[in-house]
Amino acid sequence: MNIVIVGDGKVGFTLASYLAQENHDVTIVDQDAAALEKASETLDVMCVRGNGANVRTLLEAGVDEADVLIAVTTNDEMNMVCCLAAKQLGAKYTVARIRDPEYTESLTVLKDKLNIDLVTNPERATAMEISRLLRFPFAINVETFAHGRVEMVEFKVEEFDPIANMSLITLHQRYPGVLCSAVLRGHEAIIPDGHHVIRVGDRMHVLGDIMSITNFFKNLGKDTKRVRSAMLLGGGHISYYFAKITAGMGMKLSLIEILPEKCRKLSEQLGDEVNVICGDAAEEELLEQENLTQFGALVCLLDRDEENMMTGLYAVRRGVGKVVVKVDRPNYVDVLSDMGLNSVVSPKLSTANAILRTVRALARSQDSAVVEKLYRIVEDKVEALEFTAKEGAPYLNIPLSRLKIRKGVLVAVLVRSRKIIIPFGNDHIEAGDTVILIARASSIGALEDALGEGDRR
Amino acid sequence: MNIRLVLNLLGRLLLVDSAFMAPALLIAVLDGTPDAAALGISMGLTAAVGAMMAVVRPRSDTLRPREGFTVVAMTWVLVSFLGGLPFYFSGYIPSLIDSFFETVSGFTTTGSTILTDVEKLPRGLLFWRSFTHWVGGMGVLVLSLALLPRMGGRSIFLMRAESPGPSPGKLVPRIGQTAKILYALYLGLSVLMFFVLMLCGMNWFDAIIHTVGTAGTGGFSNYNLSVGHYQNPLYEVVIGIFLLLFGVNFSMYFYLFRGDWRTVWKNTETRLYFGMVSASVLLIALNILPEYSGFAESLRYSFFQVATIITTAGFGTADFNQWPMFSKIIIFILMMTGCCAGSTGGGLKLIRVSMLFKGIKREIHRTVHPRGVSVIKIDGRALDEEIYSSVALYFFSYMAVIIIATLIVSLDNFDFESTFTAVVACFNNIGPGFGMVGPMGNFSEFSGLSKIVLSICMLLGRLELYPLLLLMSRRTWTRH
């Protein structure tokens, strides 16, 4: 695909390096010559210097023939104008990063009128990620599908887990709402069938609707670790979104912010379950005063990476169960992990990942199905594709057992008008269904191949 | 320096290079001439050396600028040395230095020869000698980038080091794709020229020889009198026009294919190029009018010489040594400027000339308005100050190399004209100079030392100094 990325910052560069590696034709537009120099020397991309909202620059970058335009400059307005211009010039799909909550509220209008196909909000994406981390504190990773209705949780099987040494047939009989989609054993990625036996140390990916997943972990005895209260440091956009997302989940929140005006505003915007405290979050005395150790989790969202790391380390030492640290320059994630800070979030990387999912999906889309999202899981060895089956596709209304499904491909979940189905041989795909498919990375070039018609062969 | 990576890349490039000898070998085998054995052995040897180096597995594949430049410089030296072996083994050029000189002259598209009688050579060797022009014209590495599986994003350094011009860039985002497009255009134009020459009545072998010589803007012919051998104005016009076409920046053809006439029409360098060609042709035609039987004839000779010199090919139809001084100086100026960046020609490149003149204009502006701010613009875009200063420095290095090389060659004690223009002709990859090395002369009289110096000049000129200079720097080879 032809992809134009406007803005050669951290997000733009990360996107460019992944997309170029995946054999897309990438052009980067930026005004900063030094940043472009770095990109052109280390990545196989073309660089165009100029203002991303300038039509001449955009044409020079080949926007008229672009399949995707991604606007990720630091400026919201610039990103919007850029998408608007690109759409007019002929770009097929546009992505804009818009972070100001003021705009986020009028998002539907903006998307409609400015013709932006995907809007990403780094702070919101990060807040979502944190909320998932807190809901499943034992999880290594949590992904959501079908607008959050389906969740996939990656976790490590521990020694005394009841499912250890259980075969998948038994597992599925006992917990019918969940599906084991992929397993990482050592460095080997497995897409398991029913005879697969779970072993201690396996990293399992289980899929299912929110209720079934929650029950599943409750039965495993992991639910007790669920975080019921959290202390948030810093009253920025992420904290705001986080409080909004977790509202109604029964989580008790304390939010510490240093600026009195900001505190007043947050207290006004957020519900009563959030306890807004005005003070310097980097002071251990204040943290102790607010009973840090009584909280299930501490989320450090201060402006400076160093403060987040230090406070995080302090909380780990004080024995707080779950510590999440925001880091803007995620260069030293490994070092942090050695020091006990496992849960590191980075708004920039979260944004890049969110955009990558959509762009990868676009690359895989076909006439008969629009791939909505493409996730890389199990050390990038396995893909989870979420797509919508379109009218007229050859695989519709045929029981799965009679479809010739490519080996190593798993039809994991069907979502039919809000109903979540873990499909068996007798189930079939209907037009309009959201289908989640698990397969080895890059093995399915064409969906039609993966779901061939069995009758004819 | 990541030596393992350099060796691995070099090995792969030599394997590609050995394949280039195949057509020449085929011709020699079909003709049943004794050069077949020499070509076969050289081809095997190149492949063997290449295979030996290619088995080295690099521990890391980060290609930094220094590795890129080293690979480019070493490739050119090795390819020239191994490519000279057929001449040496077959005994047609008994000296190893002479064989090296002849092949460097081929790959760098210079076209200077040490052979006094070219027509003695069998067709296989003649083909190989000319074919090196075609390979060297667009570049050995650019071709490899198109052919070999991708070597990662950092291979841009390889292309930058080999492609002529102040800031060679890509046409499309992928470097492999860019290389493919360049070679497709190159091949397309070459095939077109071949058929036009055939249509004009040239035999297929001569047509190939002159096509590859023109495409690479090299200038080797299979006749002692070069294109003058035919005494055929039609051939001269065809070759002249194609020479001029190969002297244009190839990205212009890419824009034309995309239907972007405006960019091409407005391009500073292309305009300057055709402007200089027209003015020179006209001035020389008028100046040499008394020596020929009419304006048409003087125009014919003037056109061909201007085309062959500005594109730095160096085919001959007339002995411009005998022309009046004014015409000779115009030709000398064209020798120095060369044609467009991103073409197959050599020389300083017109875009640099244009940048330097604009720099002078700005300097004057600054003196008049000490607080004035003015940006040098090329094609309506601001020129990066860094590129401008590198161009200015390049010009100095260019002059310095010419002067130092002239000093060494002067040890042979030939006249000033021959000594100086021999260096200029080699360094700008033209071929003939004035005096002893004029269109009707050759380089056989020079000493071994001079031939080595001139060979280095050709490589320096083709690779635009820095890759080779880097190779000679101690810092390149140390760990830090």
Image: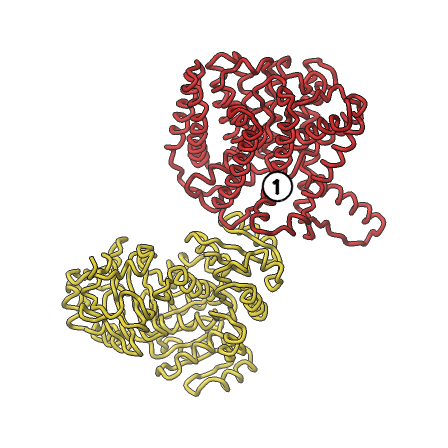
Chain colours: A yellow, B red
Which element is circle 1 on?
A: loop
Q: Position of residue A3 (x, y in %)?
A: 49, 58
Figure disc tally? 1
Q: Nearer the viewer, residue A137 or B391?
A: B391
The image quarter in which residue B251 lies: top right
Q: Nearer the viewer, residue A445 or A291?
A: A445
Q: Nearer the viewer, residue B283 or B298?
A: B298
Mark 1, Cα crowd under 10 Å, few <14 / some 14-19 / many 20+, is many
Q: Please state the chain letter of the residue tagged with numbered disc 1 in the rendered image.
A: B
Q: Position of residue A270 (x, y in %)?
A: 46, 84
Q: Amino acid at mark 1?
A: Asn
Left or right of B260: which side holds A391? left
Q: Position of residue B312 (x, y in %)?
A: 65, 30
Please name the residue that numbered disc 1 is placed on.
B249
In this orientation, does residue B246 appear? yes
| Residue that lies at the very extreme toward the right in this rendered image | B368
In this orientation, does residue B70 appear? no
Q: Is residue B240 above or below residue A201?
A: above
Left or right of A296: which side holds B297? right
Left or right of A239: which side holds B448? right
Left or right of B378: which side holds A100? left
Q: Position of residue B259 (x, y in %)?
A: 58, 51
Q: Is residue A269 above or below residue A48?
A: below
